[in-house]
Image (tube, rainbow, N blue to C red):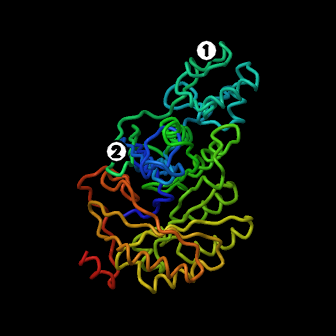
Amino acid sequence: MEMGCVWIRRMRFAGPNSNLVFKQPPLLSSSSATATLALHNPQITLPPGQPHNLTLNFTPSRRFFSNTAFSSPHSSVSVSPKSSAGDAGPGDAGAKFRGDGSKVLLKEMRYSELEKWVQSHGFRPGQAMMLWKRLYGLNNIWAHCVDELEGLNKDFKKLISEQAQLNALTLQNVVTASDGTRKVLFRMGLTRHLTTAEIVEQAVFARRLLTSEVGSITNVVFMGMGEPLQNIENVIKAADIMVDEQGLQFSPRKVTVSTSGLVPQLKRFLHESNCSLAVSLNATTDEVRNWIMPINRKYNISLLLDTLRQELQCKHKYKVLFEYVMLAGVNDSVEDAGRLIDLVKGIPCTINLIQFNPHCGSQFRPTSIDKMIEFRNLLAQGKCSVFLRQSRGDDQMAACGQLGKPGTFQAPVLRVPEKFQMAVANG
């Protein structure tokens, strides 16, 4: 069972192939989003009207798809990371940004890199800015092909046509759940992490698809069926591109990267990025977290939380988001609530309580809504900032923890601690 990346602000992105899931309360649009976008077995779902957030999820190289999900009241996108593009060759300013073919991937570059590439071919820096704005939403146009690059120098457009590639992903399918959530699948290989371009393209795709219908997408979350920080180079770079003030213009505090708790990479992220951080905690003891999140055997709860406590002292007005998926009989007791209050003391944070979404092969059951509300109230009484998140898109495997393909897949069975064996057996 992978608990490392979970649903945030009703948004998500994850996957083996690439899946985008849009979840909104009831909206379907290609501009703003109160939706969740998931990539993996192309499918998309969007519900209507509410604020819009975009969530990006990244999965490690073992996956074949990447999933993205958008859910209301925010739009979200998720992506699976894969290995980077080829190495740069001598004398070619764009070589290191090339994909499998010979053309340069424009969305693989930060603006400073794009500007150098443009100048290396004899064009003025102003042409680079014009291209950048057309790639990332000038007049609500996210250029998908050279013909949409209006206003650019004729010779410059010819260069782009011959030597550059605007798109990094290929759309395969879209599926809609009963509550309006959309799940979108992009074709991808199982050989590597997502490139920067493949990550950024999902955000661009979401805005292009939804903005005119549901308004501007404002929030992005990197999460999914894998671990975003295993692809930290491309994740940080993609986040930088998303918050560029001349491009996609997302606010850094509304671009969130979710992690299961890779401590060294987490420290690097906090040092190098101003974007938000979400940590999947999901347990209040090492015994339980070792079981449901094996990463805890390397970076235990104490090390993880002490690192956050120390690192956040240097970040002004910065809060971490703790994600807590509630599992019946496993981590939802009154005692767990008390321990959670104590664990997060001294850490500026908000806690998201997330309903577990059952799926094939899982040995866990969801905590009842009544018990989740009781748990939330206990945390609030303990002076914690806490929210209870609603699940969406579960009938199309587009909810938190469900971004994979529906079927009879058997999840890995981990050793169940003795005191929990009865609870699991009764599930």
Residue in view at x 70 percent, y 59 percent: 271
Residue position marked by numbered label 1 in the rendering: 158
Residue 81: x and y in percent read 49, 47
Nearest to the observer: residue 189 or residue 368: 368
Residue in view at x 24 percent, y 78 percent: 426
Q: Residues under labels 1 and 2: Cα distance? A: 39 Å
Chain-order first, disc 1 or disc 2: 1
Residue 316: x and y in percent read 74, 65
Query: Which quadrant holds the C terminus?
Result: bottom left
Q: Extreme top residue here?
A: 154
Query: Which quadrant holds the N terminus?
Result: bottom left
Mark 1 residue crowding within 10 angstroms, few (<14) / some (14–19) / many (20+): few
Residue in view at x 37 percent, y 48 percent: 180
Instruction: Give the secondary structure at mark 1.
Output: helix
The amino acid marked with disc number 1 is: Lys
Residue 60 can be seen in this image: no
Compared to residue 72, the image places residue 334 above or below, namely: below
Using residue 260 as the reference point, say whether residue 371 is left or right of it: left
Mark count? 2
Residue in view at x 33 percent, y 49 percent: 177
Compared to residue 345, the image places residue 22 above or below, namely: above
Residue 345 in which image quadrant: bottom right
Residue position marked by numbered label 2 in the rendering: 176
Using residue 164 as the reference point, say whether residue 371 is left or right of it: left
Residue 172 numbered tag: none
